[in-house]
Amino acid sequence: MNKIMNKIGNSNILFSLMAILAGLLVGGVIMAITGQNPVEGILGLLKGGYLTSYAIASTLTRATPIIFAGLSAALAWGSGYSSMGAQGQMIIGAITAAIVAPRLGFLPPFLAVIITLIFSMTAGALYSLISAHISAKYDAYLLIVTLMFNYLADYLASYLTNYVFLDPVALDKLAIQTIKIEGSILPRIFPRYTTHYGFLIALIAVAATAFIINKTSFGYKARMGGLNAGFAEYGGIDSRKTMYKVLLLSGALAGLGGACEVLGTKFRYVDKMITSPGYSWSGITASLMSNYNIIGVLFSSIFLSGIAIGGSTIELSMNIPSEITQIIQGVITMLVTAKFVIRWHRKENGRKEAETK
Amino acid sequence: MIFEWSYISAIISSTLRMCSPILLCSLAAAICSKAGVFNIAMEGCMMVSAFFAIVVNYYSGGSVLLAILAGILSSMLISAVLAVLIIRLKASPVVAGMAINTMSGGLTTYLMYVFFHTKGLFQNPTLNGLSKLTPFFASAFPELAQMFYGLTTVDYLSWIIAILVQIFLYRTVIGYRIRAIGINPEAARSLGTPVEKYQFWTMTLSGIFCGLAGVLLSMGSVTLFIQNITSGKGYIAMTANNLGKSHPLGVAVASLFFGACQSLGSFLQQAGLKGQITGSIPYAATVLASVVSSIRYRRQKEKKIREAISEN
């Protein structure tokens, strides 16, 4: 038994798969307790998320912002900074895109999109830098500061949408949204499916982040800080400078994610469009599931997105509330973070074995 | 209008009402950090408690006592699960706590649909709120009593709990041991204190406080459950705990400050300020308060150093 446990402890992928299975199991149990058919529910969830071409397209569309949030989280958390700020930075990126893009109509669409994306990245990065600075200079928990900044970003975007940039010609007078962006958008890759070029940008971002983390001296410093902050400091790495750089980059990624969501799916900023689907938390879960491995973030983001898409399918077809997917995701997160358990048990066992010898 | 007594007393009473959930949660955070456990799941515990209080309230035909018990028990259970994850299984407290927080959002919305077939808000005339206490001096000093208008039994209880926590931490053997664990767990263990056991029960106790806070949210000034009813109060309470340096008295002062910010927000909204601006006041105040307290702390330290130098 111990041998099996040891092997599992060594393999991240297998462990994540086990966590996923356990998460689905708990989801099934909750469905059963609340009077639904768990087998049909879970199968419906998987089918709605992965098994038709339409489902795959929707899953990839929804995965796009999650990948960006996941990259942002993997970068920050993997370097030892527990920033929850991806949500706020995405909101800032999204509202920036919604404000900038309609005003670039005179440019060719390709150029307009690039300029919008640069604006959003800068905005997200600056927003992240402000929270990083407050946290570093005034010894406040980064976690709390970024959480508070998420609320502030939400209110700020809501204010701007409501009172400054509200769509004056909206058919639905109750909808709180900015004007529709014409022309300078991220088009669909295949006309029949919702997946847009933002997904390709996400793939490029994955490659770029993986390169930065694994192949540059900055990435090395960042990872060192995550593994052992004291050792990194002793080795002559300026921790505050690294922190600023890491959080700047993670904010830029999140801002880019927000912009892609505006330019690729909604074509405008709609109040609460980033907050209510919980992209940011899904991204953090994705980064944990892959143990901050950048390439792994891609796959775990797509998985989590599929679960969410499947969840909305079974809500429509079987009347099971889609929030079941939040519960499944929470269980997966808890099990993944408790994986240290098995490693820890292994260490204890190893020590005991050594003692008996 | 602002200087009328009725207006001032209304602000004071609303401050006290807004303060008590934050006070209870920051006391929960305080005992946990005294015991050396980083607990950020107050938000989730509070939400689960607020929900189950309403569920039991509804199905028992309006029994307030059963509702309070259900709230406390559910929150205790969640805290105990988190305690096992953090203390026994060595999970990252930040990740496990945040998982609890987001999961309770999903769980309560899911169960709300299962129980009440609605997703946004649940309200029902059969639900009974917490009983409101009229101060005993109300007939003699009606002006003074206005300041305590609308306060429920649990609001008063929160202040009693603050005093009890103070006595518990600084005047009892168990409290002394808890603080010793927080300062140096290895030293405490070498003296024979069962560190894990103490931490587990401290976290479970913190669950009771969060449970009471949740009951206050869903059955205090209004009796209803609404999606995301906690709206970040658990995180604000963490800041209150930081500002108060985990000392019950300091925590109480900090909670009063955040209560005042929230009540200021709602009064400014009535005065016609935009909801987005007034809504962001508590969160902006949280960041500002951390900054100001850090500057003050640094100045005090510098002053001490300067004094030490000049003495030599």
Image: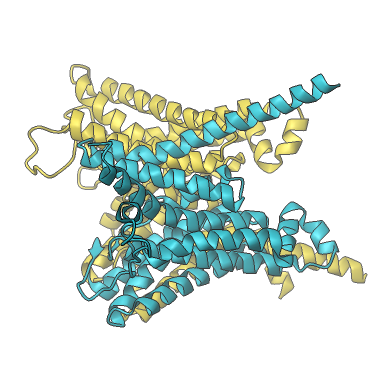
Q: How is the image coloured?
A: by chain
Q: Colour of chain A?
A: yellow
B200 on left or right of A104: right
Q: Is residue A290 visible?
A: yes
State which quadrant residue B83 falls in: bottom right
State which quadrant residue A172 falls in: top left
- The residue at the point 45 percent across, 28 percent down is A125
- The residue at the point 13 percent across, 33 percent down is A167
Q: Judge whether B183 appears above or below A182 on screen.
A: below
State the residue in front, B25 or A103.
B25
State the residue in front, A77 or B254.
B254
A231 on left or right of B52: right
- Residue B208 % position (x, y): 51, 68
State the residue in front, B278 or A328.
B278
- Residue A28 % position (x, y): 40, 75
Instruction: Provide the letter of the chain coloured cyan.
Output: B
All told, the count of numbered labels is 0
Q: Judge whether A80 appears above or below A132 on screen.
A: below
Q: Is residue A68 visible?
A: no
A76 on left or right of A2: left
- The residue at the point 73 percent across, 72 percent down is A2
Q: Quadrant of the N terminus of chain A?
A: bottom right
- Residue B95 % position (x, y): 55, 54
- Residue A131 % position (x, y): 49, 32
- The residue at the point 29 percent across, 51 percent down is A57
Q: Residue furthest top?
A: A106
Q: Quadrant of the C terminus of chain A?
A: bottom right
State which quadrant residue A221 falls in: top right
